[in-house]
Image (spheres, rainbow, N blue to C red):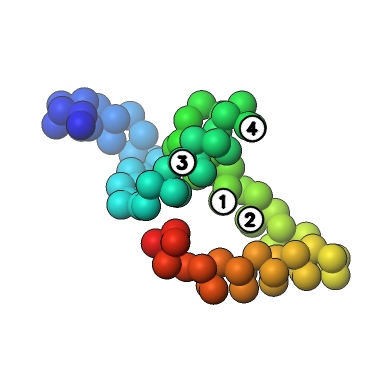
């Protein structure tokens, strides 16, 4: 865990562009994030979270005018809701 001093420096440096997100997640989620980071050549799990958000938002926007994207988004959302306990 980072020291209070290093956390303060991080917050002071990034206060206008970032907020710290501390979440407890299942090991499966951490493993998935590590895999995404490796497969997509990202800098780590934190960047994988941003990438996942970017891809999801892109799919949502694309689904507004593309039926196949809308169908995929619905499939992913339904599947997640069905198996939500695995990811929370």
Residue 12 seen in render:
no
Front one among 23 and 81: 81
- Decide which of tag 1 and tag 4 comes sooner along the chain: 4
Depth check, mark 1 against mark 4: the one in front is 4
In this picture, residue 12 sits left or right of residue 35: left
Where does label 3 land, which residue? 31
- In x, y percent, where is residue 23? 32, 51
Tell me the distance, in whole angstroms, between the alpha carbons under discs 1 and 4. Answer: 14 Å
Tell me the distance, in whole angstroms, between the alpha carbons under discs 3 and 2. Answer: 19 Å
Q: Are marks 2 and 1 in contact (CB under 8 Å)?
A: yes
Where does label 2 land, which residue? 56
**Residue 60, above or below 42:** below
In this picture, residue 79 sits left or right of residue 65: left
Could you tell me which residue is drawn at 36 percent across and 34 percent down?
14
Neighbours of disc 1 within 10 Å: few (<14), some (14-19), many (20+): few
Which circle marks residue 17 in the picture? none
Depth check, mark 4 against mark 3: the one in front is 3
- Decide which of tag 4 and tag 3 comes sooner along the chain: 3
Where does label 4 land, which residue? 40
Tell me the distance, in whole angstroms, between the alpha carbons under discs 2 and 4. Answer: 15 Å
Could you tell me which residue is drawn at 36 percent across and 52 percent down?
25
- In x, y percent, where is residue 59? 71, 58
**Residue 1, above or below 32:** above
């Amino acid at each position: 865990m980072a020291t209070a001093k290093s956390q303060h420096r991080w917050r002071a440096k990034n206060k206008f562009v970032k907020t710290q997100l501390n979440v407890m997640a299942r090991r499966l989620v951490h493993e998935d994030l590590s895999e995404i980071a490796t497969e997509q050549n990202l800098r780590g799990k934190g960047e994988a979270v941003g990438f996942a958000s970017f891809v999801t938002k892109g799919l949502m926007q694309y689904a507004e005018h593309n039926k196949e994207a809308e169908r995929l988004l619905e499939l992913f959302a339904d599947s997640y809701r069905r198996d939500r306990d695995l990811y929370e």
